[in-house]
Amino acid sequence: MPVEVVPTILVDSAEEFRKRLRSVESLVDRVQWDIMDGIFVDNTTFSDTSILSDLSTGLAIEADLMVCDPQNWIERFADTQVDRLVFHIESTSAPEVLIQDAQAEGFKVGLTLDPDTPLKQVWDYLGEVDLFQVMGVKSGFGGQEFIPEVLDRISEVRRIFPDLSISVDGGINAKTAVQVVRAGANILCAGSFIFSARGGSISGQNSDNIEKAIRLLQQAG
């Protein structure tokens, strides 16, 4: 499978959301909007879906729902540019209902879980979704160090589900990108490495630096 880079947008304002979207618009096909409610995780992010009503972009947008009420967000994103919803298995006691309801509204669906959550909790549902997202860090904050133990779950899922899209979100940089692709991932979700100084020589939000960061990740394949 070819490797796809998906910049993750974790911001506090509509202005910053638009800025980051514009900065990658000509470089990638998709972005991930990180939505945090301060309850399911300790962090909060900009999550006003009304911005989508006047957003002009050719990018596909998926929403990573780090929230305690993911069911309510299905309706909020209906009839918008968002085409995929990523649910955290820890946020629901009825994942099969979430999956069915989201698909009934026309969404693609992804499932994810934190590194300390057993893989068996999502196993029965992976044949029903479009994407398995492996969290490389604990959900809630950008800029964390990658947890290498998750490489085993990538390999295990790839072995059983050879055609399933597997993304990795959290701790992705030029080094870890190579590791997760070798393990079987085909999508790299990255925020800090692309948009901030945590990319080492890729610093700031200068458009040239953002492009270099994305190209580095693409080379992992």
Image (cartoon, rainbow, N blue to C red):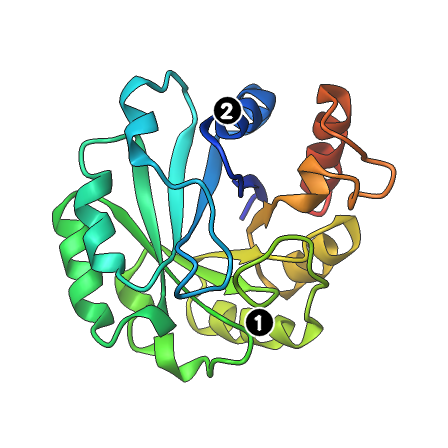
Q: Secondary structure at mark 2?
A: helix
Query: What residue did someone put label 2 on?
Result: 15
Look at 58% across and 25% down and name the residue there: 24
Quarter where residue 121 is shown: bottom left
- Give the x, y percent position of residue 97: 16, 66
Look at 73% across and 58% down and name the residue there: 176
Look at 69% across and 60% down and name the residue there: 144
Q: Say whether marks 2 and 1 touch (CB < 8 Å).
A: no
Q: In this rendered view, identify the residue nearer to me: 93 or 42.
A: 42
Look at 14% across and 45% down and name the residue there: 105
- Give the x, y percent position of residue 16: 54, 28
- Give the x, y percent position of residue 71: 20, 58
Say the numbered circle drawn on residue 77. none
Q: Disc 2 or disc 1, which is closer to the eye?
A: 2
Is the residue 42 above or below the residue 64 in the image?
Answer: below
Label located before the other in sequence (2 or 1):
2
Say the numbered circle drawn on residue 155. 1
- Give the x, y percent position of residue 209: 77, 27
Classify 10 Å Cα crowding around label 1: few (below 14), some (14-19), many (20 and above).
some
Classify 10 Å Cα crowding around label 2: few (below 14), some (14-19), many (20 and above).
few
Mark 1 residue type? Ser
Residue 75 in the figure: left or right of residue 5: left
Distance between mark 2 and mark 1 Cα atoms: 39 Å
Mark 2 residue type? Glu
